[in-house]
Image (tube, grey):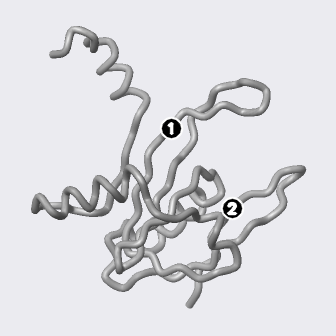
Amino acid sequence: MNELISKDFVMEMEESERIFCSIVAESEEDKVKLFNIMNSPGGKVADMINMEIAVSDVVVETVRVTDDDGEEAVAPRIVLVTPDGTAYQCVSNGVYSALKKVFKIFGPPHWNNPKRFTVRQIKKGNNSVLTLEMMA
């Protein structure tokens, strides 16, 4: 083990960072694609407001964020993956909440029959929140 990385560091990571990923990557090529989807998705969910997106796979991980007051919190970072492999990311409790409901109703992805959503932005108090509206 690298001397700069202590056992405590590894334990802290395991306790604070959780990842859900519906993509099963077996080949080296698929693993590279998965890494790129997770690490640097091409689009932002916020750029899809009022637009439809078909989702076949989802990646959710916890990340640490700092609010305007300097307070640190844990938030969900979500990557929505389309059947053609296009990936859109956001850090959003609203999208996370919507996905939890979808998972309860339809089961967790990978969905062979992609779920279609319209990305919405709603007002919640003084803030705007991203959410998903499911399309039939």
Going by the image, does 49 lie left or right of 28? right
x%, y% of residue 79? 46, 59
Examine the rendered structure and indicate whether residue 4 appears above or below residue 96.
above
Of 89 and 122, the residue lying toward us: 89
Of 43 and 15, the residue lying toward us: 43
Going by the picture, which residue comes out furthest to the bottom?
A: 136
x%, y% of residue 37? 36, 59
Quadrant including the C terminus = bottom right
The answer to which image quadrant residue 72 occupies is top right
Going by the image, does 95 lie left or right of 43? right
Name the residue: 64% across, 68% down.
47
Give the class, few, some or many, for how many residues have Cα within 10 Å of label 1's Cα (few <14, many ≥20): some
Examine the rendered structure and indicate whether residue 82 appears above or below residue 95.
below
Name the residue: 58% across, 50% down.
91
Q: Amino acid at mark 2?
A: Leu
Examine the rendered structure and indicate whether residue 97 appears above or below residue 119.
above
Name the residue: 65% across, 64% down.
46
Going by the picture, which residue comes out furthest to the left?
A: 27
- Residue tagged by mark 1? 63
The answer to which image quadrant residue 113 occupies is bottom left
Going by the picture, which residue comes out furthest to the right?
A: 126
Q: What distance separates the C-alpha of mark 1 from that of mark 2?
A: 17 Å
Of 119 and 46, the residue lying toward us: 46
